[in-house]
Image (cartoon, grey):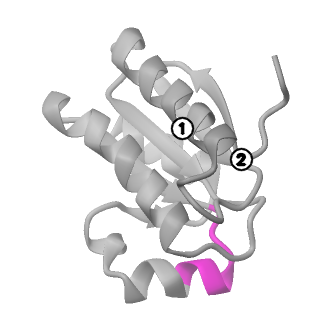
Amino acid sequence: MNPSKVFRASTIGDVLVVELVGVVSSLADDSINRELDSVRTRLRSGGQAKVVIDLGQVAYFGSSMLEAIRAIWNELTPHNGRLVLCNASEVGREIIQISKFDHLWPLVESRADALKLMQA
């Protein structure tokens, strides 16, 4: 299997942690779509309804990355799932706030804070 270009997923308890390790420049990129589909399939088959998106490895992202996060969110909504964003850079926080996604998904400082919020 090829190493992840964009999404690295792991499980901590009942939470799927998706670490963004690269930039999504376009959802038309086949390799990025395969990685996104892999995460979405993992959610469907794993029965997980809690996802933490760790933005700590990407300083900047655009609408394609937000669309990828929204696609993950769409897998959770039928199951009343929860999604929390963490570790966003200052620019990343601004992008999330300007796009109003912070009204949909909590945005916290650290992965530990995100995991703690998931247990509340």
Of residue 2 and residue 99, the one placed in the foreground of this image is 2
Of residue 98 and residue 107, the one placed in the foreground of this image is 98
Q: Is residue 80 left or right of 60 when viewed as pictured? A: left
User: Residue 98: which quarter of the image?
Assistant: bottom left
Contact flag, marks 2 and 1 (Cβ < 8 Å): yes
Give the residue at x 51% y 83%. Answer: 95
Q: State the quadrant of the N terminus.
A: top right
Residue 45, image x and y in percent? 39, 10
Give the residue at x 37% y 82%. Answer: 99
Q: State the quadrant of the C terminus.
A: top left
In the depicted structure, whether residue 82 falls above or below residue 66: above
The range drawn in magenta is 87-93
Residue 23, image x and y in percent? 71, 61
Q: Which residue is mark 1?
A: 36
In the depicted structure, whether residue 3 falls above or below residue 47: below
In the depicted structure, whether residue 57 falls above or below residue 15: below
Residue 88, image x and y in percent? 63, 69
The amino acid type found where label 2 is placed reads Val
Q: Residues within 10 Å of mark 1 (few under 14, many from 20)?
A: many
Q: Which residue is mark 2?
A: 6
Give the residue at x 33% y 14%. Answer: 47
Asked if residue 111 is among those painted magenta in the image, a careful observer would answer: no
Residue 30, image x and y in percent? 62, 41
- SS state under label 2: loop
In the depicted structure, whether residue 38 falls above or below residue 117: above
The amino acid type found where label 1 is placed reads Leu
Asked if residue 91 is among those painted magenta in the image, a careful observer would answer: yes
